[in-house]
Image: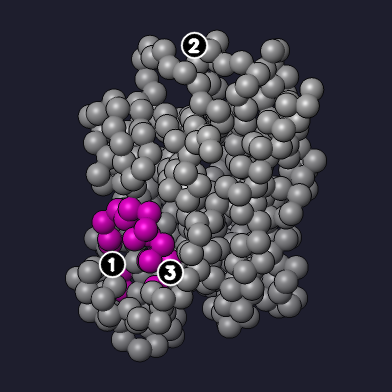
Amino acid sequence: MKRYSCDIFCRVVDNYGDIGVCWRLARQLANEFGLAVRLWVDDLKSLSMLCPEADAALDVQRCRGVEVRLWGGEFPKVNPSDLVIETFSCMLPEPYIAQMDTSHVWINLEYLSAEDWVEGCHKLPSPRPPLTRHFFFPGFTKKTGGLILESGLFAKRDAFLRRGLENFWNELKMEVPLEGTLRVSLFSYENAALFDLFDAWAKGSQKILCLVPEGRILPQVRRYIAEYGDATGNLQVAVLPFFEQEKYDELLWACDINFVRGEDSFVRAQWAGKPFVWQIYPQQDGVHWVKLEAFLDRYCGRLTVDGAEAMRKFWEAWNGNGHSMVHAWSEFLSARAELERCAMAWADELSENNLALNLLDYFQEIGTMRAFK
């Protein structure tokens, strides 16, 4: 049986969001589905943060079943793979395109969005004679490409929680949080609402342990700690090192509420089955608000009126629309039980639409169509 090959091209734009998606997909296609995968990436330092064994100084290396190549300078002469995945319209190198012919399937994997128009654009062809580029949109409905989900992830999550979290805290060299403490992970872009949120937590009645992995929000967190200390009122803040992807999943599983950003951590928070708060990447002219509200429309349709209002108000406050952070947080926390039930049901529902499986089915579909022309 033929072993198919796959090239994935990634330009790192958002530190870890783009490469996070590409690295997960590359490993899944190689290790679960047996493809010979080459990942071309222009920033190996970002990859090495997600995969510690990756060497940012090597132009060619093999990591976890994937051949990793530096995409920079003059592009080498290589044979294109059967499946060519251009991620997020990063533009394939012209020398590579010149080597392609109609036997190669060229797919552009687009950014994730919950907007209605995505369903109509999913799988649309874009001719570039003699080649055809096909758009493939991740999404939240059966009419889209779905989300990246590794086989057995939910079983790993549930086993992790059944074992208890003592080992997890030991690995972090932290004491086990006191019973009744709300555990919150905070992975965020810079955010003007941070001090207001921390103040609301410090002055609230709920004890909160806020775990902050290394990232763009860290300078703001350190300024708060420098002024108020890492424990003030009912808030304790703990700064953590940057986590590779598997350990980050465990952090999401171990926490009660997860603050995430961009695309990769946004999806992983949904697989955790816990209440989460998304900071969307800000865009010019407020375009990001349309995307944020489109997701909230889909998600909040499963909540009661009060639950939906609490989630919307807090997400909007965190993304900077001017709601009172104190009131928004209070309502969000009051809705926690309902949000927990919804989060787990949502994860189960989305798991039926697997991006890697859908992508490979489409690859086969295009190949079959061409064979009969």
Q: Is residue 265 visible?
A: yes
Task: Judge the density around disc 3: few (<14), some (14-19), many (≥20) Cα neighbours within 10 Å.
Answer: few
Look at 27% across and 60% down and name the residue there.
Answer: 240
Residue 303 shown left or right of residue 243 in the figure: right
Look at 55% across and 52% down and name the residue there.
Answer: 148
Q: CA distance from mark 3 to mark 1?
A: 25 Å
Q: Earlier in the sequence, mark 3 or mark 1?
A: 3
253 inside magenta stretch: yes
User: Mark number for residue 369?
Assistant: none
Highlighted magenta segment, given as a residue range: 234-254
Towards the viewer: 304 or 347: 347
Identify the residue under disc 2: 95
Hey, what amino acid is under mark 3? Lys
In the picture, residue 63 is in which quadrant? top left
Q: Which element is circle 1 on? A: strand
Q: Is residue 192 visible?
A: no
In this view, which residue lies farthest toward the bottom?
179
Hey, what amino acid is under mark 1? Ala
Instruction: Give the image location of residue 202, x and y in percent.
Output: 38, 75
User: Mark number for residue 156?
Assistant: 3
Identify the residue under disc 1: 238
Look at 66% across and 56% down and name the residue there.
Answer: 353
235 inside magenta stretch: yes
Instruction: Give the image location of residue 42, x and y in percent.
Output: 39, 27
Say which quadrant the C terminus sits in.
Answer: top right
Can you say whether 66 is above or below 197 in the image? Answer: above
Q: CA distance from mark 2 to mark 1?
A: 48 Å
Can you say whether 370 is above or below 176 in the image? Answer: above
Q: Which element is circle 2 on? A: helix
Look at 73% across and 71% down and name the residue there.
Answer: 302
Hey, what amino acid is under mark 2? Pro
